[in-house]
Image: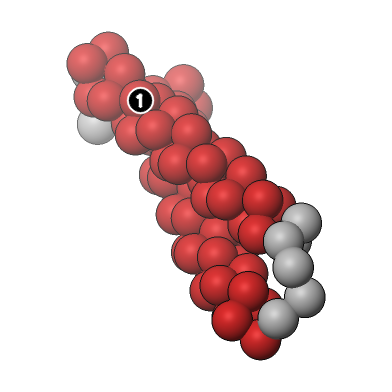
Amino acid sequence: MAETQQQLDELQAAYRAAVDEWIVAIREEEALAAVDHSVTELDKWEAAGFREHAKQREVIYRKKIYEDALRREFFGF
């Protein structure tokens, strides 16, 4: 089944949005790595790392969906 251009555009936009959110999460985690050395700050940094990892998994998922749609469109599988 051929993908419409609009469907491909939507999948691409979702992938790009996920990447943008991941970048924000990376920067938030990095910013917390440069704060004082306390348990509270360590906990914040660790939590930011979990959020970053979740965003990375979302990017991988969105990329796979987009790539699969492109394969169906271009190669029929």
**Is residue 64 visible to us here?**
no
Q: How many numbered marks does the figure carry?
A: 1
Q: Residues within 10 Å of mark 1 (few under 14, many from 20)?
A: some
**Circle 1 sits on which residue?**
13
Q: Quadrant of the N terminus?
A: top left
Residue 42: image x %, image y %?
67, 78
Q: Please tell me which residue lies in front, 23 or 37.
A: 37
Tell me: 50 left or right of 58: right
Q: Please tell me which residue lies in front, 74 or 16.
A: 16
Residue 50: image x %, image y %?
54, 71
Residue 12: name its quadrant. Answer: top left
The three-letter code of the residue at mark 1 reads: Ala
Q: Please tell me which residue lies in front, 3 or 28.
A: 28
Up the image or down, 67 lies above or below 48; here it is above
Tell me: 72 left or right of 19: left
Residue placed furthest toward the bottom: 39
